[in-house]
Image (cartoon, rainbow, N blue to C red):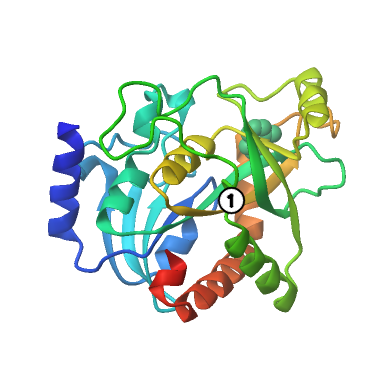
Amino acid sequence: MRSMTETLAFLHERLTERPRVLLILGSGLGGFADELEDAVRIPYAEIPGFPPSTVEGHKGQLVAGRAEGVECLALQGRFHLYEGHPPERLALPVRAAAALGARTLIVTNAAGGVNPAFRAGDLMLIEDHINLMGRNPLIGPVIPGDPRFPDMSEPYDRGLRAIAERVALERRIRLVRGVYLAVAGPSYETPAEVRMFRRLGADAVGMSTVPEVIVARALGVRVLGVSLITNAAAGVAATPLSHADVVAAGAEAAGRFTALLRGILTELQRLPDVELA
Ligand code: HPA
């Protein structure tokens, strides 16, 4: 883990505050990081060990700053399996943030709606996930400090989910809930695959998030996950899928997403750090 040591040394030097929350902002949702106060922005290309982001709609920079009084480390754009990264690298930012002191991960993504009741533009609270990526970021020698077989019985923290539900209710933001199923991508799913995913218990399908969540849980970091349903998954609606539509849906939902996130951070700010951890 030579690169991890270098990554941490670099970040320790550049960041002045200990982050409490790591925010991973998915396709079209990166705008929230532009609103952070007293922000320090670092392009991934400058951070040792971080590869540049190659996906349109992902800026590829880390932003440290405060929102609602909570010190955040936000990733504008993440690394995906389909970009060719080895699975263990996908969660490098999670390892770095945890080492810097963050005890909470708020992870977001764009996803296709498998549940026919979902509408494009819905925000979905992730209750659980199914890993059909065929890979796991913990495969390989055990990294010192990691458990060999981490527990995954509550990947998405019950307490954080309750906070999100309460905020959505108070602020009148439609928040559906469901199971996120992760595939490797980059091709979108076929209608037959989507029918299979529905039978398996999935409500949404996407190409990210699960590797980061697995590593966060292995490190004891609490996780809150929110999917933006950008489209009905293949076969659920008649229209073909395009990345441009995914990015456009993100722009449309940005206001609601930001309101939800601000409400959640406000609640976290009220909690003492021990409860946060
Ligand atoms: N499938 C997989 N990933 C996605 C989708 C989809 O329909 N929409 C946004 N990300």
Does any portion of residue 242 appear in the rendered image? Answer: no
Q: Total of numbered circles in the picture? A: 1
Say above or below: 229 vs 241: below
Quadrant that contains the N terminus: top left
Quadrant hosting residue 206: top right
Quarter assignment of residue 144:
top left
Cβ of mark 1 under 8 A from ligand 1:
no
Q: Position of residue 194 (x, y in %)?
A: 77, 26
Residue 107 makes an appearance in the image:
yes
Above or below: residue 85 compared with residue 60? above
Q: Residue at x 36, y 65 (%)?
A: 20
Residue drawn where x is 40% and y is 21% of the image: 84
Ligand 1 quadrant assignment: top right
Task: Indicate left or right for 143 with 168 as reference.
Answer: left
At 81% from the left and 49% from the top, the residue drawn is 119
Query: Residue 211's x, y, as percent?
Result: 47, 35
Residue 247 placement, left or right of 270: right
- State whether residue 61 is above or below residue 48: below
Looking at the rendered structure, the secondary structure element under dot 1 is: loop
Residue bearing mark 1: 156
Q: Residue at x 71, y 78 (%)?
A: 170
Q: Nearer the viewer, residue 48 or 88?
A: 88
Name the one closer to the observer, 166 or 31.
166
**Coordinates of residue 130 in the picture (x, y in percent):** 64, 33
> Which part of the image, by quadrant, shows the C terminus?
bottom left
Other-residue count near label 1 (Cα within 10 Å), few / some / many at <14 / 14–19 / ≥20: many
Q: Is residue 137 left or right of residue 228?
A: left
Picture coordinates of residue 210, whole percent (x, y): 53, 37
Disc 1 marks which amino acid? Tyr
